[in-house]
Amino acid sequence: MPFQTPITVKEAIDDIHSKKYLLPAIQRELVWAPEQIERLFDSLMRDYPIGSFLFWYVEKSRSQDFQFYEFIREFHQRDSRHNAKANVDGEADIIAILDGQQRLTSLYLGLRGSYAFKEAKKRWDNDAAFPARKLHLNLLKRYAGEEELDLKYDFAFLTEQEAKQRNGEDYFWFRVGEILGFKEHYEVNNYLIANGLMNRPAEKSIFANRTLFKLFSVIHEERVINYFLEKNEALDKVLNIFVRINSAGTPLSYSDLLLSIASASWKERDAREEIIGFVGEISRIGDGFDFSKDFVLKTSLVLCDLPDIAFKVDNFNKKNMLTIEQRWEEITKAIRLTISLVAGYGYNRDTLTSSYALIPIAYYLLKTGAPDNFVQAGRYRTERDKINRWLTLSLLKRTFSGTPDNVLRPVRQVIDKTHDSFPLSHIIDELRGKPKSLTFNEDEIDNLFKYNYASHYTFATLAVLYPTLDFRNKFHIDHIHPRSSFTKRKLDARGIPDEKIDFYLDNFDLLANLQLLEGVPNMEKSGKRFDEWLAEVYETDQAKRDFMARHYIPDVDLSLENFAEFIGERKRLMVAEFERLLKL
């Protein structure tokens, strides 16, 4: 497997674009963030080595024996993360990338593609939160950001509008992909002159000249792509090479290795397409989740009753992979039903803090052969309530943090032995007194009140207090006393003494001032004073008392001026209910 004659970045990009270079099914998808791509281009510009590559030569006559995928061309964090399956019906032989896919994909996205990542503080279901960005290089000034990043050149993924808006005295953003259109050195000069970059102060003109000529050189002239070419077409050997390369450090997760071997071992199905497609499907259930291959593959190991469920290469043998393939339909049915059930409890990507807490649920549903109507049918109400209680307890106790296998194994044994009904009490007994116990003491209950509005654990904590709610309706986490009231200026205007203001500002966002309220009433309540809203919505004393009882509202003066007593009394009511429900 000798080194081949190195090639230029331009040659590599052209071969990707023409689909001469493809990816074998054992390869994972793009995992590099924009910052890593920017650093790669900075390394090229500074003549730093970017590592060697390993290519796999497959003759046309053998290309139909394997599954190949194209490089991703326009990456979208929500909608386009998966590589398209390649058509290998042509006459040409194939070069598949065994090592270097992340770097080559990054080079392609920087030069010919785009990268759409979510903007902060925008919703995942908002299309405008994912504008397409292309890689740009500032031609007037070196990188001036965080020193610890040790960057010289200022690369950034920008929208076309951002690039125009940010141009000025110290910035001229050159779209990096334009360099592919330059064929000769004089074209670099032409660009610099046409855009007035040679009329800038001498220091900036010199920097622009050197920077753009260097970019031209590292893309078109310097042979920086050093690669080995493997010509052995035995898949077992290729897989061993791939695993050896990618397990030397930590560039691949164990789930990637498992997916690699599944791709090589499954007989009737395309493992990569099935597993990645299923991850996307279940992540779209309800309000949306963020499941991974790790979750699906770990669940598969557990549901197939394989004795060792650890992510170890030794467990990724052909026998286990074939077992998963043979049981794939029942595995996916159980997982799909589990996610639908959990979505009905009101959970989503923001509030489900551990996907591993769902694995025992899926195992139970598979063992009992739960029907498709398990989520809706009244006859299963008691079972659904027990499962919901398991989920709440395990999330709040962070049962699956650390070493989840130490919980999954004994819980699986309990369910395997006792699954006429969901064996919540047996699971509690099994874990009682152990580091991952599901019972709460007084200190742990008190710690629940430290969760604030933005915490991922707040929904599960509040859900404990509302066991009868039908979460298929939309419930929001609501500030009882509206958060808009809690500014120093507004509190001063209400006559709140200075010595009390710190208490108001420290507590308004915490659990004791939060409740679960249906979406429409929550929007109608909005920024209204709580005492006024309560009197407006609930006209009879009985209706008002019922609301207060459901939401643990104390029978005290509910004006903002009495906020300190309200918080103290509501916490007392909530603690009593937590102790009843969680001390077990």
Image (cartoon, helix red, strand yellow):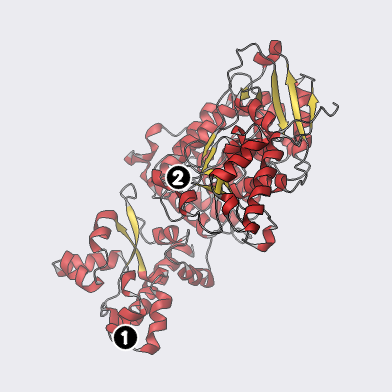
Which residue is rendered at x = 66% and y = 53% of the image? 207
The image shows residue 340 at horizontal and vertical percentages of 42, 40
Residue 185 tag number: none
79 is higher (above) or lower (below) than 164? above
The image shows residue 578 at horizontal and vertical percentages of 43, 66
Q: SS at mark 1?
A: loop
- Of tags 1 and 2, the one toward the viewer is 2
Residue for badge 2? 130
Q: SS at mark 2?
A: loop
The image shows residue 279 at horizontal and vertical percentages of 52, 36
Which residue is rendered at x = 60% and y = 27% of the image? 17
Going by the numbered disc 2, the residue's amino acid type is Phe
Near-viewer residue (437 or 445):
445
Q: Image quarter for residue 434? A: bottom right
Q: Is residue 209 visible?
A: yes
Q: Image quarter for residue 125? A: top left
Going by the numbered disc 1, the residue's amino acid type is Ile
Residue for badge 1? 496
In the picture as drawn, the residue positioned furthest to the left comes out as: 539
Q: How many residues crowd mark 1 within 10 Å: few (<14), some (14–19), many (20+)? A: some
Q: Is residue 307 visible?
A: no
The image shows residue 435 at horizontal and vertical percentages of 63, 60
Near-viewer residue (369 or 203):
203
